[in-house]
Amino acid sequence: MKQYTREFRYNIRLASPVILGMLGHTFVAFADNVMVGQLGTAELAAVSLGNSFVFIAMSLGIGFSTAITPLVAEAEGAGDAREGRGVLQNGLVLCTLLGVLLFGAVLMCKPLMYLMDQPEEVVLLAIPYLDLVALSLIPLIVFQALKQFSEGLSKTRYPMYATILANVINIVLNYLLIFGMFGFPKLGIVGAAIGTLASRICMVFFLWWIFVRRPFFRGFVEKLRFRQVERRLIRKIANLGFPSALQMFFEVAIFTAAIWMSGILGKNPQAANQIALNLSSMTFMFGMGLGVAAMIRVGNQKGSGNFPELKRVATSIFLMTILLEIGFAVLFLLGRNLLPTMYLDVNDLSNQADNTEVLAIAARLLLVAAFFQISDGLQVVVLGALRGLQDVRIPTLLTLVAYWGIGFPFSFYLGLHTPLKSTGIWIGLLLGLTASSIMLYLRFRYMTRRLLQPMDGA
């Protein structure tokens, strides 16, 4: 056990800035939900519906950008600075183009809201909110390219600083524009969308400013030539990025389907689903951060060719993840009745009946969420380790089978055709996540065994 636990300190030092940065992204949504929730359950459901479209597009953009981290980590492990600079240059070009395409795709999908059997008042509120949040996809995905590059060099603190700044900007603008404070117009949920857009633009400029100012990065950014794209690197990033994007898409899409199915059940189930989803997203960010640490460390060891060390450090991160997620499971079990009260004005007598129903449903969903903490955290960390190995195609098929061959059918049937309703939707999510974690871990064992076989023979 010592050979694994002695890695915990370094794993924490590497992952904690990433976790804080990831939590920062989630905290933007948390701040929006808490502030908008004070306006009413319809407004909260509208933010949930609008974000469901954005989350699908965002999953593709963020998933694609993760290809940059293992390629940079491998280049650093091999001592090839020129290759690392080329990955940044070509990765930025691809992520910018992808951000523009995803923005256009979200706008084209807006009419689908009217065909999804969602409450009409929720759809009318969601449309103007979605316009601005969709536009924020462009700076967000450009930021992700810069962030993944920095993390590939094991410089995980700087993206965290940018995300903290973005949260401050978002909260201040939300306060001023949602409620119309200090003479600013009262814009409701549109004010929340403006805060999100402005904060994401600031993230890009702040992180680029750090790159220009810090000597460590200056050699990379001063020599960028965006007109000189390299087909070899474009192909390399795309071959790794698109399967990675699909992996994240399959998971985010099933949670998005849960939002839409909850909307069919009514605005209160949809609002409760949003509360439970936002809380689960926060704990998921710890797994995401450890997954990035696994991607970096496995990529470094792959670059240096030290495969026994690769397996050891990856196993140490898996063990850390299991211990951490057990703690989150206990937190959700004990706090399932208290945590949802943060999102609603429980003293609002005019909405008391709606609020009471939302809190009761959210508590049941958090009970299910407590059980999938371990499988959810483990699957994303193992996926990070597989990306560090640059093994993405088979894991993409495994996630497709887990979420859409196993999870979605159970969610659909139990949620819409049994008395379980919202709880049934989340039981399907639990089954999909558990299947994913098991299959991905078996894939990692198979891949590491293959890498170690030539050494065993020698």
Image (cartoon, rainbow, N blue to C red):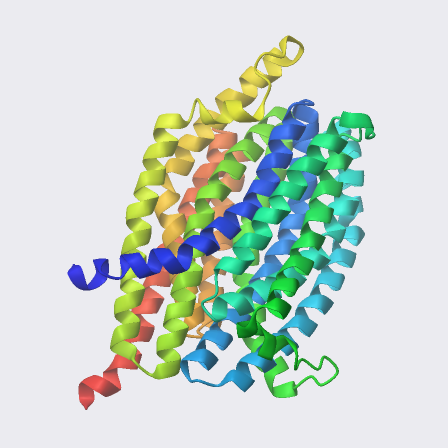
Q: Position of residue 153 (x, y in %)?
A: 48, 71
- The image quarter containing residue 48 is top right
Q: Position of residue 194 (x, y in %)?
A: 76, 42
Residue at x 68%, y 38% (from the top left corner): 49
Residue at x 68%, y 48% (from the top left corner): 199
Above/below status of 140 relative to 223: above
Most extreme residue toward the left is: 1
Task: Please name whichever residue, 329 or 299, is drawn nearer the observer in this view of the structure.
Answer: 299
Residue 393 in sight in this render? yes
Residue at x 50%, y 76% (from the top left corner): 71
Image-based side of 99 in relation to 425, left or right: right
Task: Please name whichever residue, 332 or 265, is drawn nearer the observer in this view of the structure.
Answer: 332
Task: Please name whichever residue, 351 or 212, is drawn nearer the observer in this view of the structure.
Answer: 212
Residue at x 30%, y 73% (from the top left corner): 310
Above/below status of 212 relative to 416: below
Task: Please name whichever residue, 93 or 254, is drawn nearer the observer in this view of the structure.
Answer: 93
Q: Position of residue 29 (x, y in %)?
A: 61, 40
